[in-house]
Image (spheres, grey):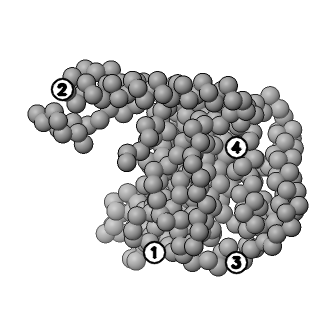
Amino acid sequence: MGWPLRMFQEEGFYFVTSRCFQGRLLLRPSAEVNEVVGGVLAKVVQRSAGSVRLHAFTFASNHFHLLVWARGAALAAFMQYLRANLSKKVGRLVDWKGGFWERRYSAEPVLDDAALVGRLRYVLAHGVKEGLVQRSAEWPGLTCLAQLLGPARRVFQWFNWTKRWSKRGGEDWAVGAGRFAEEIAEPVELEVAPLPCWEGLGEEERQLAVRGLVEGVEAEARAQDKPVVGVRAVRAQHPHTRPERLKRSPRPLGHASTRQALKRLREQYRSFVAAFREAAAQWRRGNFSASFPLFSFPPRVVPGRVARVL
């Protein structure tokens, strides 16, 4: 069964999720993993040159969430670069040589301000709602909370492996220097942008709003009165561990505060799929001038062999 078609907007907000292969704890928090992940995330935001804007993020032990604004299909290249570099660099850190990601990422449109705040709350709840830590600030993995409550910019190290290969054998290259050597580390700045519905607020007001979300999450967790795993136990887990059970639920088409907005999105998606399938049928028959929906990806066809689609 093929993947559902991905529909991008001319510009819009997306809640992005990507899970590690078999739910293994390949992103298990550590100082080294956090630095590498932060560097990769900062680099890909920098490379996007404003076509993707980061509003929130959290990295769990076996998946991550992003809340982003993106223009057109820019998110596709953004996620390709992010996931490819995370798989190579974090995979090297945790000694994992197989496939790193379980399936392709999900990118669910977020349609209004209330839904944006709801997705931000979901991001900030990580670690607490699962019973891993008591407070959101205790989560040892990489998260945007510190940047939402303090300076919006944070500097990470991007380990430039291209520079490593170009330096190998040179006089200034230390013998035995590895893939995470200081000689190839480049500082790169990661900025978390405020939600558009909060842009009119002052810095202190935005921080107060974030604290309110966090306090609500922590109060709900305390009311459940369940035992907490704790930071030490989270860090002690082996990255190759495969959980016995994984939480799985259908991916929503999008996020909105009203049924009407979701209904419009569903109708828009159905029209998009119908238009894509019609264009794809013409493409397979050899009509390569067929018009595909905006920001979609036409199938690849081997020249001279019309019936074969890659």
Q: How busy is the neighbourhood of tag 1: few (under 14 within 10 Å), some, or many (20 plus)?
A: few
Compute the Cα span from label 4 to label 2: 43 Å
Q: In which quarter of the image is residue 152?
A: top right
Residue 286, disc:
2
Residue 117's place in the image compared with 43, above or below, is above
Provide residue 26's location: percent of width, then percent of height: 53, 68
Q: Nearer the viewer, residue 3 or 114?
A: 3
Q: Which amino acid does label 2 sit on?
A: Gly
Compute the Cα span from label 3 to label 1: 20 Å
Mark 2 element type: loop
Q: How busy is the neighbourhood of tag 2: few (under 14 within 10 Å), some, or many (20 plus)?
A: some
Q: In this rendering, does residue 154 appear at all?
A: no
Mark 3 element type: helix
Q: In which quarter of the image is residue 287?
A: top left
Q: What residue type is labelled 4?
A: Arg
Q: Dot 4 corresponds to which residue?
A: 119
Q: Which residue is drawn at 66% across and 63% down?
A: 141
Looking at marks 2 and 3 on the same chain, the residue that comes earlier in the sequence is marked by: 3
* Horizontal relation, residue 264 to residue 289: left or right: right
Q: Dot 3 corresponds to which residue?
A: 233
Compute the Cα span from label 2 to label 1: 46 Å
Q: Dot 1 corresponds to which residue?
A: 95
Q: Which of 135 and 276 is in front in this view?
A: 276
Residue 182's place in the image compared with 118, above or below, is below
Looking at marks 2 and 1 on the same chain, the residue that comes earlier in the sequence is marked by: 1
